[in-house]
Amino acid sequence: MNKSSLCFASLLGAMASVSAQGLYNLMPFDDEASDSLPLNWTVGANIGYDDNPTPIGSGVAGGGGSSGEAYGDAYVQANFVNQDPQTTLDVWVRLGIIYYFDEIRTVNAVGTVVNTEDTFYQTRGGLNLVHRVNERLRIRSRNSLAYETEPDYSYGVGADRRQGQYFRWSSDNSFGYRWSERFGTNTGWRVQGVSYDDLSGSDYISNLLYNEFRYRATPQTVWTASYRYGFTDDDSGPDSNSQFFLVGAEHQFSPTTVGVVRVGGQLFQPDAGSDTWAPYIEGMLRSQVNEQFSLRGFLRYGIEPYNRRIATNNAPMPIQSSLYDDHSVLRVGVQGSYAISPRLAVFGGGHIIHETYDDLVAGSTTPAPPPAAPGSFDETILNLNIGGSVQVTENVYLTGSYNFTDSSSDSNIREYDRNRFQLGVQATF
């Protein structure tokens, strides 16, 4: 591995490990590690400044949480990959802690302090297993967990803003079988869940059963047709079922560039409410443009069966929780990295999440809808990041990053801007 690749691997290894199991990766088998890696350790520490650490209600007078706060964090990560002709095992774990030098006050929209903390934990881990039973049958298991405070936009399952710590986990298990030289199937079961420490009534567990038919039309192109059935146990409102009918394609544009797209319809069926047909689309593009420049992106649009209960009022009215049948979400993300020199690397990217809430459910908080609750509701999250890494010795790097988040909403208690600056040092061995 050359120095540029090593710098990128050190800087972006944690992000890549997570995103490989999220929306940046849609293909059945393309996330498999290509080489074995002996046990590798990464340790680091940062100091930073967050100008809006508790953004809920910060856009209205009297509704903000803490003012800008400085913080320090430290982490350790271990990676291990073992590959032989039949089996690939990829394991990683990251343990981290964030300490704010002044306590953070979590405040609701009417100025009431609901929690005060200065220490937060960030734990992530993953285990991926691919076993090639024979030339036709391949079994795959992808598993991850995280205990953190900020939403991971590349997953598309977390809250849209900091709401205390939460536990997120997922397990995707499938087997692919090649029936002929051109035709194959991929069948599996995915289960994921989220549990919040400080946000009652918002936990959920979601299951998805799926089967995909795959036809290799050319050496570069695979046509797909799939059916998915999902069911969600949601503490925030009625449980629901979803059915997906999708067609798509996977295309190898070049040896280093691949794209995936799937489009079709989604039938959303809440236990209490009306069935809804909606379009569904997901896509991914990944490219190693040249030795220095890599780029990844994703897109997903559909009805998400969780996070359907939200606060919809404008301050200074009392907070009112409203439940909606239809929660349609567009998620777009892009990340890139570039080696300016063998010792200097930069990265950047962003995410856009546009949420539309329709069909207010009567009886969401009282026998009738809250008086201030609108029949439909929109909001948009924009998140941008940029950073870099400078190699100072063979295995030590200086790092820096800037992260910007903007929330635009029909409810002013959900609007905010947030800036985070961070400098640190990182070592691998």
Image (cartoon, grey):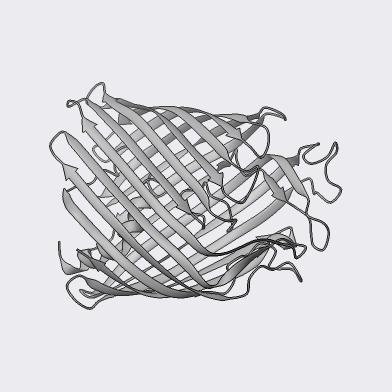
Q: Quadrant of the N terminus?
A: bottom left
Which percent across, then down, holds residue 178?
A: 25, 25
Q: Quadrant of the C terminus?
A: bottom left
Between 38 and 154, the one lying in front of the other is: 38
Q: Quadrant of residue 183?
A: top left
Residue ID at (43%, 57%): 122
Q: Is residue 13 above or below residue 166?
A: below
Q: Quadrant of residue 316?
A: bottom right
Give the left or right position of residue 293, taking residue 268 as reference.
Answer: left
Residue ID at (71%, 60%): 108
Which percent across, then down, holds residue 287?
A: 31, 55
| Furthest residue in direction bottom, as rendered | 392
Q: Is residue 384 above or below residue 282?
A: below
Between 332 and 204, the one lying in front of the other is: 204
Q: Residue 313: in sight, yes or no?
A: yes
Give the left or right position of residue 70, taking residue 134 as reference.
Answer: right
| Furthest residue in direction left, as rendered | 85
Residue ID at (76%, 70%): 62
Give the left or right position of residue 64, taking residue 48 as reference.
Answer: right
Which percent across, then down, holds residue 73?
A: 42, 68
Give the left or right position of residue 420, taking residue 297 as reference.
Answer: right
Q: Residue 19: in sight, yes or no?
A: no
Residue ID at (30%, 57%): 77
Q: Is residue 93 above or below residue 103?
A: above
Number of marks in picture: 0
Which percent across, then down, holds residue 165?
A: 53, 54
